[in-house]
Amino acid sequence: MIFLICSAVLFIAVVSVVPKKLPKCELYVIALFSMILGLCTDIVLSLKYHLYGYFSPGIQLESFLVILILFPSSGVMFMNFYPFKKSLINQVFYIICWNIFCLLFEYASIISGYFYHNNWNYWYSAFSYPLLFLIHLFQLKFFRTYSK
């Protein structure tokens, strides 16, 4: 629980102090979308299929810290610094770096005891994170297209 609380405080601090490269309305939509995507993913993979979970099987109030703080703040950090105007190689490298960060964070979360794997493994995560990042990028493109 200490790792989760420290992570939440750190993520909020980073999101609060870094310069924002995206408009506030886009950051707001990214944060909301990250919460919804994380919640839907966790409902299916954790509660329905029991592939992983937070703390112990079932729903715990503490797991809402992940959904309400870690998901939106990490989504905002990822999208705020995404190299939209750089080459495809830079964009792929950025996603790979975030993938490595997420895998290391997942490992630390398991070691700390607030996250666990059942029938899930790091290979699933290694392929899932880039897909989730691409979904975020598509969602922002969709928002930009239809908010004009």
Image (cartoon, helix red, strand yellow):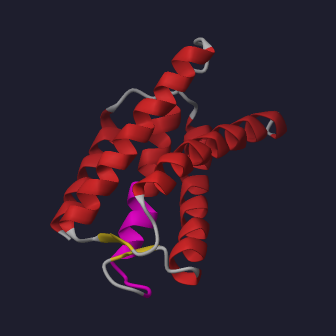
Residue 5 is drawn in which quadrant? bottom left
Report the residue that reaches farthest toward the left. 2
- Residue at (50% x, 56% y) in the render: 124
- Residue at (60% x, 21% y) in the render: 84
Q: Magenta region, mostly helix, strand or loop?
A: helix
Could you tell me if residue 101 is visible in this image? yes
Residue 97 sits above or below residue 35 on the image: above
* Extent of the magenta region: 58-70
Check the picture and name the quadrant holding the C terminus: top right
Check the picture and name the quadrant holding the N terminus: bottom left
Query: Which of the pair 45/13 is nearer the observer?
Result: 45
Q: Is residue 61 magenta?
A: yes
Residue 146 sits above or below residue 97 on the image: below
Instruction: Please give left or right for residue 66 compared with residue 109 in the image.
Output: right
Q: How many marks?
A: 0
Could you tell me if residue 21 is visible in this image? no
Residue 83 is drawn in which quadrant? top right
Residue 114 sits above or below residue 124 on the image: below
Instruction: Please give left or right for residue 25 compared with residue 63 in the image.
Output: right
Report the residue that reaches farthest toward the bottom. 58
Q: In x, y percent, where is residue 24? A: 55, 37
- Residue at (48% x, 42% y) in the render: 76
Q: In x, y percent, where is residue 104? A: 30, 47
Q: Is residue 145 magenta?
A: no
Q: In x, y percent, where is residue 77? A: 43, 38
Query: Which of the pair 97/17 is nearer the observer?
Result: 97
- Residue at (83% x, 40% y) in the render: 146
